[in-house]
Amino acid sequence: MNATQILIPAFENGDVLTRAEFERRYQLMPEHQKAELIEGQVYMAAAAVRAIHHGRPHSLIMGWLMTYEFSTPGVMVLDNTTVRLDLDNEPQPDALLRIEESCGGQSRVSEDDYIEGAPELIVEIAGSSASYDLHHKLQVYRRNGVREYLVWVVQEREFRWHLLEEGQYRLQQPNSSGVLESPFFPGLRLDATALLAGEMQQVLAVLQQGLSSPEHQDFVARLEEIKAGEG
């Protein structure tokens, strides 16, 4: 071990740091290491990621979100991106969907290429309902104004889609067909039953119905008007 390596401060789960110190240390960590600052405390993910309990669900969610982005100019999907929410919280959610700043979004890309502010939708893949995704992080996202928070709870085989209303999260219920739909991103529909069954063609077919709806077309037009007005 050389002198430079000895001087690198190590992360440990439970470390209490300022956001500035957290970022300084994170920049010295190996690129594959994932760490988050939640309420001033460091949470580190395991270096190994399981296939069926995380990697596969994550991939399916990204495919669903990217399909929505391709048909919705003015929105941006990001994967495992650091988000500066406030001075005590810098999570790295599994996925997020945001409206671009030029189209009226509430977050922005900083000069050093991080997200600052609350994305409109955050998605996390949680192993179980005991995960901090459904406790500490949920409260952090609520307090910082994340409009929608979707958690895929893998072991319980369920989706929890939280909607921000009057400062509190309300849990959305699927319709009789098992479909959840975003109230903020018109056309973003999720066939939860099909996704749990691994029927991705059905998931995308239901999403396509949403993308073909008048509500989605109106949403795209509104984003274009906002962008043109700022230009």
Image (cartoon, grey):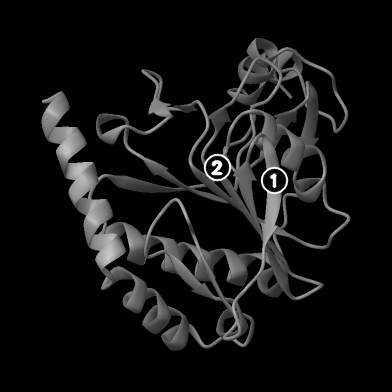
Q: Earlier in the sequence, mark 1 or mark 2?
A: 2
Label ID, residue 169: 1
Find residue 137 and name its label.
none
* Up-down relation of residue 6 to residue 199 (above or below): above
Amino acid at dot 1: Tyr
Looking at the image, do the residues carrying marks 1 and 2 touch, with CB atoms under 8 Å apart?
A: no
| Residue 218 screen position, x and y as percent | 23, 56
Q: Position of residue 160 (x, y in %)?
A: 69, 62
Label 2 crowd (10 A; few <14 / some 14-19 / many >=20)? many
Q: Secondary structure at mark 1?
A: strand
Spot the residue most to the front.
166
- 75 relative to 91 in the view: left or right: left
66 lies left or right of 28:
left
Quadrant showing the C terminus: top left
Q: Image height check: is 59 above or below 44? A: below
Residue at the location (42% across, 61% down)?
65
Q: Name the secondary structure under disc 2.
A: loop
Q: Quadrant of the N terminus?
A: top right
Q: Which residue does the image show at 25% across and 30% down from the upper left?
A: 102
Badge 1 density bin: few <14, some 14–19, many ≥20, Cα 10 Å = many
Tell how many labels. 2
Q: Residue at x 72, y 57 (%)?
A: 48
**In terms of image quadrants, where is residue 14?**
top right
Q: Which residue is mark 2?
A: 147
On screen, residue 48 versus residue 191, left or right, reads right
Camera-nearest residue between 94 and 108: 108
Q: Is residue 113 above or below residue 32?
A: above
Q: Residue 34 location, x and y as percent?
A: 66, 40
Task: Give the quarter of the image for residue 103.
Answer: top left
The CA span between labels 1 and 2 is: 9 Å
| Amino acid residing under circle 2 | Arg
